[in-house]
Image (cartoon, helix red, strand yellow):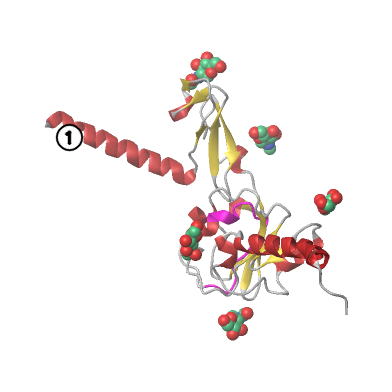
Amino acid sequence: MASRGPGGLWSLLPWAVALLLAVEMALALPEICIQCPGSVQKLSEVARYCKQTPNLTLQARCCLNQKGTILGLDLQNCSLKDPGPNFTQADTAVIIDLQANPLQDDLANTFHGFTQLQTLVLPQESRCPGGIEAWYTVTYYKDTQTCQGQRNLCNSTRHPGTCPENGSCAPNGPGLLKCVCADGFHGYKCMRQSSFPLLMFFGILGSTTLSISALLWGTQRRKAKAA
Ligand SMILES: *[C@@H]1O[C@H](CO)[C@@H](O)[C@H](O)[C@H]1NC(C)=O
Ligand SMILES: *[C@@H]1O[C@H](CO)[C@@H](O)[C@H](O)[C@H]1NC(C)=O
Ligand SMILES: *[C@@H]1O[C@H](CO)[C@@H](O)[C@H](O)[C@H]1NC(C)=O
Ligand SMILES: *[C@@H]1O[C@H](CO)[C@@H](O)[C@H](O)[C@H]1NC(C)=O
Ligand SMILES: *[C@@H]1O[C@H](CO)[C@@H](O)[C@H](O)[C@H]1NC(C)=O
């Protein structure tokens, strides 16, 4: 038997480093990938996408690229009423599967900022976020439906003049828009000038919030005057 000298131990070093890296990667996995037990279902669309695209790996419920960015998320059959607060970690995803969950209510707000999403699998009874007009193709199956290809609503005739003169419209997830102020402008309606660029957000949901706050601000002011 050859004795295990220091040389033998040194030869183990690369393995130890590899093991540590693997452990670290597993620990660094975004919460959304591990909050539902199990892994991506073998026959799911997410698994198929991950295997046919180069340089992607399946980990827990996610399909990740080499930098650890989430490109696919399979949360099917997780007893979810809603995807939860950590769902925004998956806003880089191209494909998401939420089938076989008792999802509730409107999903519109859930997909804020999910601009990369191309394929979304939902339970039959849910509605594609943003409605049918936000997607190129909506397909109904026995137990599921698939929403595919986000439409850019920025130049749809239904939302003309959404953005002010010195702002431009950009997609912000299914059925959602945002206005990006031109360089050097910021604030409400991009009317204030400054030396640094800032974003101004208002989409279909944002504009309601904005008008409510304007209303509250108005009444508060009147109260203050009366007092
Ligand atoms: C995959 O990764 C390898 C090594 O990092 C790289 O050379 C190759 O270009 C990548 N392929 C794609 C399609 O990104
Ligand atoms: C969902 O998960 C349960 C166990 O948690 C399993 O018994 C059932 O077969 C699964 N359903 C589907 C459609 O995968
Ligand atoms: C969301 O992530 C945080 C850490 O960022 C974690 O503490 C929390 O438990 C997660 N929430 C859910 C519902 O998994
Ligand atoms: C939509 O807007 C983009 C720029 O915002 C423009 O390049 C494109 O031609 C427009 N498409 C249509 C159909 O108007
Ligand atoms: C937009 O920018 C131009 C100069 O670039 C300025 O003259 C104009 O007043 C701005 N419009 C608004 C509504 O702020």
Residue of label 1 = 223
Q: Quadrant of the N terminus?
A: bottom right
Residue displayed at 59% across by 52% down: 91
Q: Which of the pair 217/129 is nearer the observer?
A: 217
Residue 160 visible: no
Give the camera-side residue of 145 and 42: 42
Q: Is residue 89 located in the magenta-colored stretch of the structure? A: yes
Residue visible at 61% across and 59% down?
Answer: 28
Residues in magenta? 88-101
Look at the numbered disc 1 and give the secondary structure of its residue: helix
Q: Residue at x 28, y 35 (%)?
A: 217
Left or right of residue 210, residue 146 in this image: right
Furthest residue in direction right, as rendered? 1
Side (left or right) of 108 relative to 64? left
Horizontally, residue 22 falls left or right of residue 28, namely right
Q: Position of residue 77 (x, y in %)?
A: 58, 75
User: Residue 94 at what x, y percent from top left?
Assistant: 68, 55
Image position of 193 (left or right of 143): left
What is the quadrant of the C terminus in the image? Answer: top left
Q: Position of residue 109 (x, y in %)?
A: 49, 53
Q: Quadrant of residue 42?
A: bottom right
Find out whether residue 79 is within the magenta segment: no
Residue extending farthest left:
227
- Residue type for callout 1: Lys
